Amino acid sequence: MSAQLQSALETPPAFCEGIQYFADSFPEIDRLGAAPLLGPTQPALPDVTSEASVYQTLLAADALRYLTLQVTGSKSSGHPGGFASSADAVAALHLLGHRNMVTEVGHHAPGFYSAMFLDSSLEAMGIHSVAEMRARFRERHGLLGHLSGAIPGLLAPAGPLGQGQHFAMAGAYLHRDKLFPVTIGDGGLGEPYIMSAFQHFATAYPDVTNYLPVLVWNGYSQEHHSMVSLWDNARMTAYWRAHGFDEVHLVEAREFADTPDAPGYPDQGPTMSAYADSTTFGFAARMAFTAAILKAADAAAKSALGGRRACLIVKQLKGAGVHATGAKSHNLYAHHTLDSDDVKDGLQRRALPIQAWKVTRENFRHAGGGPAAKVAVTESVRALPSLDGLPLNEFAVGENHVPTTAFGHVVAEVGRRDPLFVVTNADGNEASGMANINQALTIRHPTADALYFQGPSGQVYEPLNEDACAGLAVGVALFGGRSLWCSYESFAINGLPIWQTVTQAMAELRRPTPATVCLFTAGALEQGRNGWTHQRPEIESYFAAMMRNGNVYPLFPVDANMIQASYDWALKQHNKGIVITASKSPLPIHATMAQSRQAIDEGAMVLKETTGAHTVVFAVTGDMVLGPVLAAADKLAEAGIGSRIVAVVNPRRLYRPGDVPWDSVSEPDGRFMDDAAFKTMFHGDVLIGVSGGPSAPLEPVLLRSQASERDVFCWKRGETTASPQQLFDFNGMNAQAMAERALAMLERAAA
């Protein structure tokens, strides 16, 4: 019946405003749904085997499906189908009291929003009714199309596939007494990262088992069948066991079908008919299926919390209970309105009586001890051990020292003080001049071997997978811990998608959390013999573009003093993404520790200034590239031309305030170099930007420079060489070329 007719008989609660259809009855509602099972002193279902527990879980799943379709249909936009086939498991886990739930599937967002609405978490952002949720779905300052860091009660963002498992494992690592379920779509299971990440984490942390993958095995991906749609149950079970899971709890909807023609894959034959829509079953069959889900979810959760790695697999047709099934249920388009027959029929099929909404609302409000916006682990600031007075080793100007080794000394001390601090590295700290990190903190490995500084209780996590490295590191930071992702510059690209996802989420978080920090070493200039496969400085363009976000800070320390000051600064920051790029070769010390701190704070510092008839300004990012720049300045001095070499250390500080939406992010940082200071540092007759990587990090300098002649020397392409100098020569970046370019620019400026 319509909402209008129902309201004439019974007034719905205020939160139900915007629900388009109510049912006038539901089987057994008076007997099993008369009162909620959860309450202020009952945070979880008291008996998972009772009829009432099963019944109220079924109501919760239907409520989630209804809201998902109602909200997406109101905007003719969004993704209802994938979540719909997971609703039974999600409802079960919530009512079992497990509120720290994440997902690998961004397209499940409307279902997750529905859960947060039911438990009243969305009231923190002014959403009190279904009507308000409909109005703000997929709108700015509302409920984003994919999960973000802005939504109360939701622990982690969900963007590209293959990321959610990292958040579940990071949460489990930091909070050993909580369960972290993560829903994973069988479409996303094709991502190679998911299972390899689980496998390595299980090997490295065999005692951390309190994460629970929930595979939504519905047979379809976004626009076609999933790549695992033809697997049988035995193969899927073996697949998970082969990746370190002790228990596989698999519930197949088809086994509970009460008619031989229950909807499955249309016209696909007996093999494909394994996928069924449980919402089409009769009431008794639906109860049996829900009972199996509830029992399996409870058993899997208890095992995961009790020391055994478990997963839950729900095998049910995609789109169960919404407007369509299969891949056709995945997305709504403009013709899917609330008045279109398919959406309207889907809502009417899932409509619930007002009493069901009342019971479900109360159950969600009290599950796990309260709304997720109050009880989820990410809704409060996590206490951290103090890092006051870290011992920084100041080297004398003019001496030669390895920047990364000096950095490793500080990292080791952080690990000593913070036992949950984790360092991740796929290609080895020792290869980057940071063996001291391994020596102090130990590589986490089941095989103890003092020769390699490895053992089962180490703080250095070394999967040969940059996604797994970045994933655990950024997950720990997002969930309130300290971490460091170290990588060869050339390989880091495989870990950047999740780093970007988390950094963007940090810009929206409602709480401060430690900055996510990474160090990229062994840049192209140090990788000559390896050839272009190890020479990928173009990665710096990625971070240069992200500087415009408002909370991303690439740092380019010039020496072993400044890299320590950079890390010390990074450790004090919140809700930022901080990238430190440095060399592993012995290099001259150019700056004192005090000068280093000032350069990081202001954005740049003058390293050397020579007077002459004219002034050539060199704006430089990097450390090793200073060699040819200093040599070029000497050549110009011989010709009577002055120069000023400026180290661009923190280029984000050199933008103009209007270039960056700094005031729109969480924990805003509005410090920028003012015009007068910029002019003093960068004004000259000509300006030459120099970078051992791409020119993009120099954009703020080039934007603000008033020099009539500006140019850049930067990386072009890799090649196999015997020395950094040969790479400079190949890329046209040697001292002779810089001096000649400067003289030509001066001649043009004078014309």
Image (cartoon, rainbow, N blue to C red):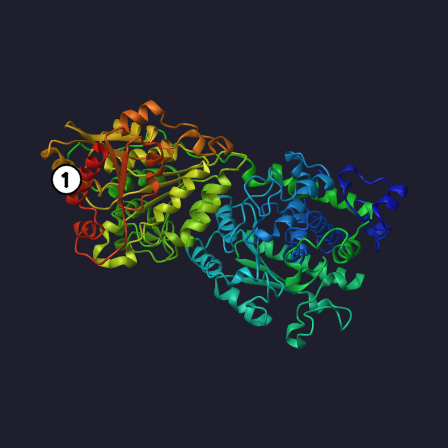
Along the viewing direction, whichever of 113 and 728 lies nearer the viewer: 728
On the image, the x and y values in percent for residue 345 come to 78, 57
The correct choice, above or below, for 540 with respect to 413 in the image is below
Q: Amino acid at mark 1?
A: Ala
On the image, the x and y values in percent for residue 686 come to 24, 33
On the image, the x and y values in percent for residue 354 come to 82, 45
Residue 621 visible to the viewer: no
Residue lying farthest to the top in this orientation: 676
- Image quadrant occupied by the C terminus: top left
On the image, the x and y values in percent for residue 44 come to 68, 46
> To which quarter of the image does residue 447 belong?
bottom left
> To which quarter of the image does residue 317 belong?
bottom right
Residue lying farthest to the right in this orientation: 9
Residue located 53% across and 61% down the image = 189
Q: Is residue 516 left or right of residue 644?
A: right
Which residue is labeled 1 in the image?
A: 631
Q: Is residue 70 left or right of residue 473?
A: right
Along the viewing direction, whichever of 298 and 2 lies nearer the viewer: 2
Residue located 61% across and 52% down the image = 108
